[in-house]
Structure formats: C-alpha cells, structure tokens
Image: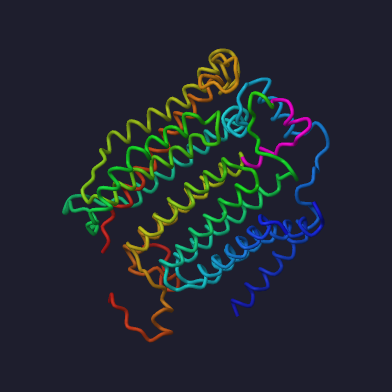
C-alpha cells in the first residue's frame, strides 16, 4: 500500500461524502460548495489518470465558473429550500 | 502491479463514477426545489466525464505529449495513454457548463414571474 | 411511494452499470494492433510535427467538432442574454453589490494583469504544453470576474466584447474556408509546418485557430457574467 494509493482512496471517499452532503443539505449555499469540492477532487483524479488538458479544463470551468453562476442564481432567488422552515419551525428572517 | 492494488484501483475509479451518477440521478428525480435538480444534473455530468476518461488509461502509461528526444518510443515501447477520450471529454465539460448556465437563467426568469422555485407550486404551463 | 419507485429504478440502473463495467479490465491493453490510438499518436509526429496530441486531435483531425462546440457556447451566451432581458425604460440602476474591503480592491487590481498574462500564455502555447483555447479563455474570464466583483462600478464596454467575439468567430470559420478554397478539405492545414518540434511557430494553422478560440471564449464568458451580475435582485 503505497502512499499514492492511500491518498487516492481517501480522496475518493471524500468526493462521495461531498456528493451526499450537497444532495441532503437544505441550505443551498452549502450545497453549491459541495459541488465545487467535487470538481476540485475530480481535477486531481484527472491528473492521476495522466490527462493534463482535461484537468486544466475541469479546474477552470468546474471550480470557478459553475460555482459563481450558482451563487448569482441563489442571490436572485431563494436561499433555503422549503422544508427548512417547515421542519425546524424557524421563522424565516427574510419574509 | 499486484492484485490488491489493481482491484482497489478498479473499484475506486469505476465505483466512484457510478456512485456519482446514481447520487445525481436521485437528486434530480426526488427533490422539489429547482435549484437542487440542477445541482443533481451537474453531478451526473461530472460522473460521466470521470467514467469516460478512466476507460482510456493504460497501466504504466504516460501523458500523450511528445518531446523532441522521445518521439518514437511513445508508440512502440513505452505506452502513451489513449488521447481520444480526452478530446471527447474536453468538449463534454464545456457543453455541460453551457447547459447549466442556460438552465439557471430559466430559473431566474421563472422566479421573476411566480415568486417561487418549488415545482409543486408552478402548475400552469403557460404564463 | 415516489421515493420507493425511484430507489428501485436506481438499483436497477446501478446493477446494469456494474454488470457492464466489471467485465472491462482497468488499465489493460484491450485493442489489437492498428487501432485509432496508435494511428493518432503516429500521425501527430509524422504529419503535423506537433508535440501535444490532444490539441492536434481537437483542432486538426476532429476540427469540425470544435466548430460545433464554439457554436454551442455562442448559443448559450446569446440565449442567456435574451432570456434575462429587461426593458431599460424606467430604471437604470444596476444590481446592488456590497462594497468590498481595501485588501480585496487593491489585491484584485494587482492580480488582474498577471491573470490575463497567464491566460494568454496558455492559449498561445496550446500546441506545445497542456492547455489550449478553452482553458486560456476561461482563465481570462476569471480575471475579468475578479475585477467585476471587487469594484462596484467597473464597466466593460459591451460593443468591444461584441466586436472581439464576432471577429474571432469569423476568423475560425474563415480559415476553414480558405483551406476549402485552396483545393483541399475544410479546415485543412495549409501553412508550412516548422522544422524542429518544440518551436512556437510550428504546426500550421493550429496556433492561429487556438488564438481565435481563446479570444472568442474569453470575451463570450465575460459578457455572460456581466449579464448575470447586472440582474437586479428583488
């Protein structure tokens, strides 16, 4: 078990954990951060698979541009999902 | 390389990409907020791209970039990784981003009119 | 009820995917001699004299798909601009952005020029090192995004973006047509290839096409982000 293999297993588990987190989380800003973590680890995987062009493209588009257009959309619509207020009996500070 | 490393690598790359596809599909089918559905679609795109690139890998291969001294050896003795899936995935990543951008602009426009992003509330087909 | 059905569907899809991909061995040489991979690896050195194989596939051997991809990006930017269109008759105010601190403002202005330089380096040397038109264009758009977020009233002239984008797109299609006029195929290599391999001026039309693609993608994504940021949140 070399060091690269341990690092690879750790990164793969972290990527799937970030995917599950971004699906379950009801605060949409944190879900967007989960997507950008997935893109970052995916860029490292592309480098490990000896594909430097694809790693550059995924790092530039997936991390920078996709996150910013999600954040701009959240700013123009709602930040929380609807179940966030119903289940926790929390009054929304916005409305 | 030995058998445990090989099985770990196989399970790692194929398993994580198939898991990403399934997690993204679950988010796109079950969730009620439109923004969650688009996040799910973006995760499915990432999973498919990882699956395509990991099909072209060779054991002990190197990146498909030449240099003036090792021109001939990359095809004959030392193997180079398959460059065709990388060219396909390059296009696929850019097109995935374009589709996400257009979908998000449609969500902004819908919110301007209906004041909600839940698909249960938006019932009429024509505004 | 819906969740149970969705779980059944996902289990079925997952079972079939695992069934297909467990037979394909990871990393083994599965294809016999005379396949597409060896063909492209050899032809890049003998025919084109270009080090980066992925660039030569994307621009030269399968250049028509790159033309389609540039068209899809252009369609996405123009559709986004037309969906979010708002008649500017009653109010001219932009979206309200919070003012940023002094560190962000001065640091962005310092970092703007090196980011543009990095983006230009990546798409000019696309045929020698990993990189290319799309990567360099996205890096340039990230530099403009930094300036747009740091300063509240940073304006980018819309006419300049429009002219740069149109001229770059016309250059790409025009080079293809020149190759057609010269009696060969569309997007054929008609400029002379260099003698040595790692020279900047080598590879025929490949650097020119990538420079055009870099300009086009950079200006297009800047226009897209500018349209999105000007959306007045209510």
Asked which colour scheme the image uses, the reply is rainbow
The answer to whether C54 appears left or right of B104 in the picture is right
| B10 shown above or below B56 | below
Q: Residue C46: x and y, percent?
A: 68, 20
**Residue C203 position within the rendered picture, expressed as x and y whole percent measured from the top left:** 56, 21
Residue B42 x/y as whole percent:
52, 57
Is B83 magenta? The answer is: yes
Q: Nearer the viewer, residue B122 or B115?
A: B115
In the rendered image, the quadrant that contains the C terminus of chain B is: bottom left
The residue at the point 29 percent across, 55 percent down is C231
Q: What residue sits 52% from the left and 39% below the top?
A: C69
Question: Residue at point 66% right, 52% down?
Answer: B51
Number of numbered markers: 0
How far from the left and from the top, in percent, is residue C117?
A: 38, 34
- Asked if the magenta segment contains residue A67, the reply would be no
Q: Quick check: B11 above or below C195? A: below
- The vertical placement of C183 against C213, above or below, is above
Identified at 32% across, 83% down, the residue is A91
Q: What segment carries the magenta color? A: B71-86
Residue at the bottom extreme?
A89
């Amino acid at each position: 078990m070399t060091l690269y293999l341990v690092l690879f297993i750790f990164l793969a588990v972290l990527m799937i954990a970030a995917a599950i987190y971004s699906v379950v989380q009801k605060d949409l800003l944190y879900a967007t951060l989960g997507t950008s973590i997935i893109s970052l680890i995916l860029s490292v995987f592309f480098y490990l698979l000896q594909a430097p062009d694809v790693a550059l493209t995924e790092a530039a588009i997936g991390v920078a541009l996709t996150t910013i257009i999600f954040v701009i959309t959240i700013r123009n619509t709602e930040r929380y999902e609807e179940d966030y207020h119903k289940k926790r009996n929390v009054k929304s500070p916005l409305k | 390389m030995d058998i445990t490393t090989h099985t770990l690598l196989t399970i790692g790359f194929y398993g994580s990409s198939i898991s990403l596809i399934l997690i993204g599909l679950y988010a796109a089918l079950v969730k009620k907020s439109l923004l969650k559905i688009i996040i799910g679609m973006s995760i499915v795109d990432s999973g498919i791209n990882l699956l395509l690139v990991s099909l072209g890998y060779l054991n002990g291969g190197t990146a498909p970039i030449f240099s003036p001294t090792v021109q001939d050896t990359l095809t004959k003795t030392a193997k180079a990784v398959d460059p065709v899936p990388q060219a396909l995935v390059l296009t696929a990543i850019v097109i995935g981003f374009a589709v996400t951008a257009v979908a998000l602009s449609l969500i902004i426009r819908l919110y301007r009119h209906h004041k909600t992003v839940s698909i249960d509330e938006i019932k009429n087909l024509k505004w | 009820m819906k969740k149970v059905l969705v779980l059944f569907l996902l289990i079925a899809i997952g079972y079939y995917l695992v069934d297909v991909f467990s037979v394909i061995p990871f990393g083994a040489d599965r294809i016999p001699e005379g396949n597409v991979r060896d063909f492209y690896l050899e032809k890049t050195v003998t025919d084109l004299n270009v080090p980066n194989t992925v660039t030569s596939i994307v621009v030269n051997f399968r250049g028509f798909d790159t033309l389609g991809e540039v068209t899809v990006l252009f369609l996405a930017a123009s559709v986004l601009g037309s969906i979010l269109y708002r008649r500017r008759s009653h109010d001219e105010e932009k979206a309200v952005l919070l003012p940023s601190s002094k560190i962000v403002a001065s640091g962005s202005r310092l970092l703007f020029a090196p980011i543009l330089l990095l983006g230009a380096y990546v798409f000019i040397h696309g045929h020698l090192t990993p990189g290319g038109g799309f990567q360099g264009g996205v890096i340039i758009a990230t530099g403009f995004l930094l300036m747009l977020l740091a300063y509240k009233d940073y304006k980018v002239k819309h006419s300049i973006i429009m002219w740069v984008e149109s001229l770059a797109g016309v250059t790409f299609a025009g080079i293809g047509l020149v190759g057609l006029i010269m009696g060969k195929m569309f997007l054929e290599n008609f400029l002379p290839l260099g003698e040595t391999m790692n020279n900047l001026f080598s590879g025929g039309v490949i650097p020119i096409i990538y420079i055009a693609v870099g300009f086009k993608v950079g200006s297009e994504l800047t226009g897209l982000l500018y349209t999105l940021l000007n959306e007045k949140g209510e």
